[in-house]
Image (spheres, rainbow, N blue to C red):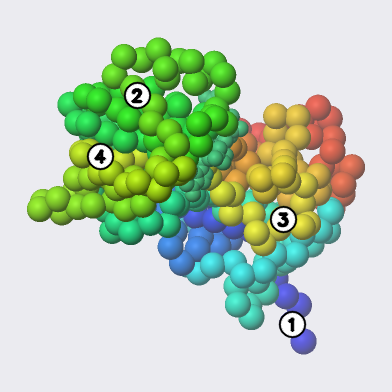
C-alpha cells in the first residue's frame, strides 16, 4: 500500500485571503494545495467595480480581481481543487485532515480562509436586485449612488458606518431599523444622527424590494413593526447592513471561536489555539472586512505557517513560540 501524501499546507477557501496565502506559500516552495471552493472568489464575485484596492487607480471589476489573484497563485505552482471542503478534522500539532466529498487530504499545516457572508433579509427582490441597486457593502458600492435617494437597513454599527459613508454620495438617505432601540454604539449612532441628509426610520421591517421598469430597484415596501401598516419608499439604492456570518461551520466545535463563530487568533498573529492551524481573512475579522485587509492577513497566515513548518517536526511548542522565539525565514522575494 502506498503511503498517502502529506501536504505541507492546505489552504481552505479561495478568495482574497486564501489566494494571497497561496501566493506566499507557493513562493516559499511549500507547494500549497488550495481547496478554493466550487464558487471561488468570495464576496468580490458579487461586486462590480472595486475602486479601493490599491494598485488599480482606474478600479477593477471584482471577479476580474479575483481571477488575477488566482492566476498569480497558479503561476507559482499552487495546486487547486475547485470544490468545497466538506469536512475538516483539526489537530493540535499533528496531521490536519480535510475532505472534499470522499477524498481525504492530509497536511502538516492548514490555513483556514473560508470567509464570511453578509446576512440577508430573505425578502422578495433581495437576490434578484442584487447588483441592480441592492448591495450588502456600502463602503464598496456607495460611490455608485451619487445624487440618489437610498435606504440602509440595519441598526448596528455596520448600518451606521454604511449610512455615514453612503450619505456622502446620496441625496437623501433613510436608515431603516426594525426596533426603536439601536444596537449600534452610541458614538456611531450620534454621528449618523448628526449628518443632515440621514434620517432614521423606526420601527420598520422591509418586506420587499421592488424593481422599476429599468430592472433596477425603485422602491422598498416597509411594514410598521407595531401597527402593521405598510408603505413604499422610493429609492435608487438599498444597502442591507444587518451583519455577517463567518463561514466557520466546519471547524466551529474544534477551534476557539467567539460567540458569533469568528475564529479567534492570538497575539496579533494568525495562530489559533491549535498548533499548525492558522486562520485569516473575514473568517477572523468582523471589523474591517476589506479585500486589502483580507489579503494582508493571508500573507500573515502564509508566513506563520512557513515559520511553523520550518521547525520540523511541527510541535505545539514551536507553534506557541511564534515570532518571539524565531527568526524570520530567508527572504523569498
Ligand atoms: P450587529 O451588531 O449584529 O447588528 C445587526 C443589526 O441588523 C441589528 O440592529 C439587527 O437588529 C439588524 N438585523 C439583523 N437581522 C435583521 C433582519 N432579518 N431584519 C432586519 N434587521 C435585522 O452587526 P454589525 O452592525 O455588522 O456589527 C458587527 C460587529 O462589528 C459589532 O461588534 C460592531 O460593533 C462591529 N463593527 C464596528 C464598526 C466600527 O466601529 N466602525 C463598524 C462595523 C461593525 P436588532 O438590533 O433588532 O437585532
Mark 2 or mark 3: which is in front? 2
Q: Secondary structure at mark 3?
A: loop
| Mark earlier in primary sequence (1, 2) | 1
Name which residue lies at 73% across and 50% down: 277
Mark 1 or mark 4: which is in front? 4
Q: CA distance from mark 4 to mark 3?
A: 40 Å
Q: Check contact, mark 2 vs mark 3: CB within 8 A.
A: no
Q: Secondary structure at mark 4?
A: strand
Q: CA distance from mark 1 to mark 4?
A: 66 Å
Compared to residue 96, the image places residue 304 above or below, namely above
Mark 4 or mark 3: which is in front? 4
Check disc 4 and report the residue beneath it. 233
Check disc 2 and report the residue beneath it. 199
Q: Which of the 4 quarters of the picture holds residue 52?
A: top left
| Mark earlier in primary sequence (4, 3) | 4
| Mark earlier in primary sequence (4, 2) | 2
Count of numbered badges drawn on the protein: 4
Residue 87 drawn at (x, y percent): 67, 69
Residue count near mark 3 (Cα–Cα under 10 Å), binned few <14, some 14–19, many ≥20: some
Question: In screen coordinates, is 72 left or right of 236?
Answer: right
Residue count near mark 4 (Cα–Cα under 10 Å), binned few <14, some 14–19, many ≥20: some
Q: Secondary structure at mark 1?
A: loop
Name which residue lies at 58% across and 23% down: 185
Q: CA distance from mark 2 to mark 3?
A: 39 Å
Depth check: give the residue in front, 118 or 121. 121
Check disc 1 and report the residue beneath it. 2
Residue 78 drawn at (x, y percent): 52, 57
| Mark earlier in primary sequence (2, 3) | 2
Can residue 288 be seen here? The reply is no
Depth check: give the residue in front, 306 or 182. 182
- In which quadrant will I find the N terminus? bottom right
Amino acid at each position: 500500500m502506498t503511503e498517502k501524501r502529506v501536504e505541507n499546507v492546505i489552504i481552505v477557501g479561495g478568495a482574497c485571503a486564501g489566494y494571497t496565502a497561496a501566493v506566499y506559500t507557493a513562493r516559499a516552495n511549500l507547494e500549497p494545495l488550495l481547496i478554493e471552493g466550487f464558487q471561488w472568489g468570495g464576496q468580490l464575485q458579487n461586486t462590480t467595480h472595486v475602486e479601493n484596492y490599491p494598485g488599480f487607480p482606474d478600479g477593477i471589476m471584482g471577479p476580474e480581481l479575483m481571477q488575477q489573484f488566482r492566476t498569480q497563485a497558479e503561476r507559482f505552482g499552487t495546486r487547486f481543487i475547485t470544490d468545497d471542503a466538506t469536512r475538516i478534522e483539526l489537530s493540535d500539532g499533528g496531521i490536519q485532515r480535510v475532505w472534499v466529498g470522499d477524498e481525504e487530504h492530509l497536511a502538516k499545516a492548514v490555513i483556514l480562509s473560508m470567509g464570511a457572508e453578509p446576512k440577508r433579509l430573505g425578502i422578495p427582490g433581495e437576490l434578484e436586485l442584487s447588483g441592480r441597486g441592492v448591495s450588502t457593502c456600502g463602503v464598496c458600492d456607495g460611490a455608485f449612488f451619487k445624487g440618489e435617494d437610498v435606504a440602509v437597513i440595519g441598526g448596528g454599527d455596520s448600518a451606521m458606518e454604511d449610512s455615514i459613508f453612503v450619505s456622502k454620495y446620496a441625496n437623501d438617505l433613510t436608515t431603516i431599523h426594525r426596533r426603536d432601540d439601536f444596537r449600534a454604539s452610541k458614538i456611531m449612532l450620534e454621528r449618523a444622527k448628526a449628518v443632515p441628509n440621514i434620517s432614521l426610520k423606526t420601527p420598520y421591517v422591509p418586506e420587499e424590494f421592488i424593481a422599476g421598469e429599468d430592472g433596477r430597484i425603485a422602491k422598498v415596501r416597509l411594514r410598521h413593526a407595531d401597527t402593521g401598516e405598510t408603505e413604499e419608499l422610493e429609492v435608487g439604492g438599498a444597502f442591507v447592513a444587518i451583519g455577517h456570518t463567518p463561514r466557520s461551520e466546519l471547524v466551529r466545535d474544534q477551534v476557539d471561536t467567539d460567540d458569533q463563530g469568528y475564529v479567534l487568533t492570538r497575539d496579533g498573529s494568525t495562530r489559533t489555539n491549535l498548533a499548525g492551524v492558522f486562520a485569516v481573512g473575514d473568517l477572523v475579522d468582523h471589523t474591517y472586512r476589506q479585500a486589502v485587509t483580507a489579503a494582508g492577513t493571508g500573507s500573515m497566515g502564509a508566513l506563520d505557517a512557513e515559520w511553523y513548518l520550518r521547525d520540523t517536526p511541527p510541535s505545539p511548542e514551536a507553534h506557541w513560540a511564534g515570532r518571539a522565539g524565531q527568526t524570520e525565514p530567508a527572504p523569498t522575494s
